[in-house]
Image (cartoon, rainbow, N blue to C red):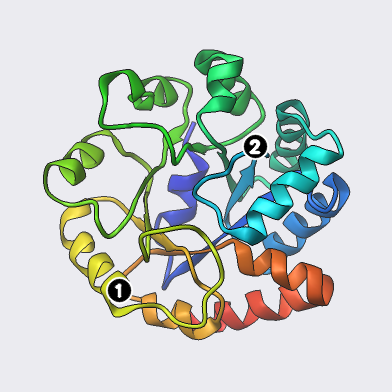
Amino acid sequence: MENRIDRALKGAGGIQLMTHVVAGYPSLEVNAELIRLMARCGVRLMEIQIPFTDPLADGPTIMRANQAALDVGITPGHCFELCSALSSELPDVGFMFMTYANIPFAMGMERFLHQAAASGASGVILPDLPWDETDGDYAGAARQHGLHPVMVISPDTVGPRLDAVLRRASGLLYTTLKVGITGAGSSIGQAGVDYVRNLKNKAGLPIAAGFGISRPEHVRMLSGLADVAVVGSHIINLLDREGMSGVEDFLLACGRQG
């Protein structure tokens, strides 16, 4: 069966969006409504974050959402159920589980990958897993389950370390536009744009770029360089401030930029 991430990226014109929800924030019901809205706006790649107590790659917005979800008792099981329901309803969307290594290690990596695949996910993102060490290379096991191991790199990933990632990655390569944590920003630094441009010539995979995207103009800046613009914190901020209509307006404006 063709992986949905591959299908979403195949023959896509312009730059696509990849969005992010924290499962359970503000509720699983709102998650489902938001995911349906994003699909109606043309989003075909979505991350579902399994909440964790110490989301070290995330900034204050997503960290707050993680804690709020944990406070109401959200478990990995709830996250798998959410994906299972929505992946059946939205067959054109490639879902990815994003979380931190403690979660699959506590469950057992094999069980985690099995449940992720069984729920209809197409990929997994574990940003704190040491993929350049032998005992951290879960990529082969993920692919055996039909999941793309989506590797996360940053502008300081170069030379042999970058080569090691490229040997393991599949589906798409997720690069941050800055070194640090997630969070909506007012601008995208030129260093991040230059890194994406250079990466495009070497990667051999579709490139997703994120960390700081909060305006339709940011998406336009990346068009022709990256294949996918990742928007996470800004979606949560919009939902909190302006509700579903604010998210919809932003996504439609981004679509016009691509």
Q: Amino acid at mark 1?
A: Val
Vertical order, 209 against 167 (above or below): below
Residue 137 spot, x, y in % from top left: 33, 24
Vertical order, 193 against 141 (above or below): below
Residue sitting at x 83%, y 56%: 33
Residue 228 spot, x, y in % from top left: 43, 63
Q: Which residue position holds label 2?
A: 52
Residue 101 spot, x, y in % from top left: 50, 29
In front of the other: 178 or 109: 178
Q: Amino acid at mark 2?
A: Phe
Q: Which residue position holds label 1?
A: 193
Question: Label 1's element?
Answer: helix
- The numbered mark, 2 or 1, whose residue comes first in the sequence reads 2
- In this image, 202 relative to 241: left or right? left
Residue 83, picture quadrant: top right
Numbered-mark total = 2
Which numbered disc, 2 or 1, marks the residue closer to the eye? 2
Residue sitting at x 43%, y 37%: 128
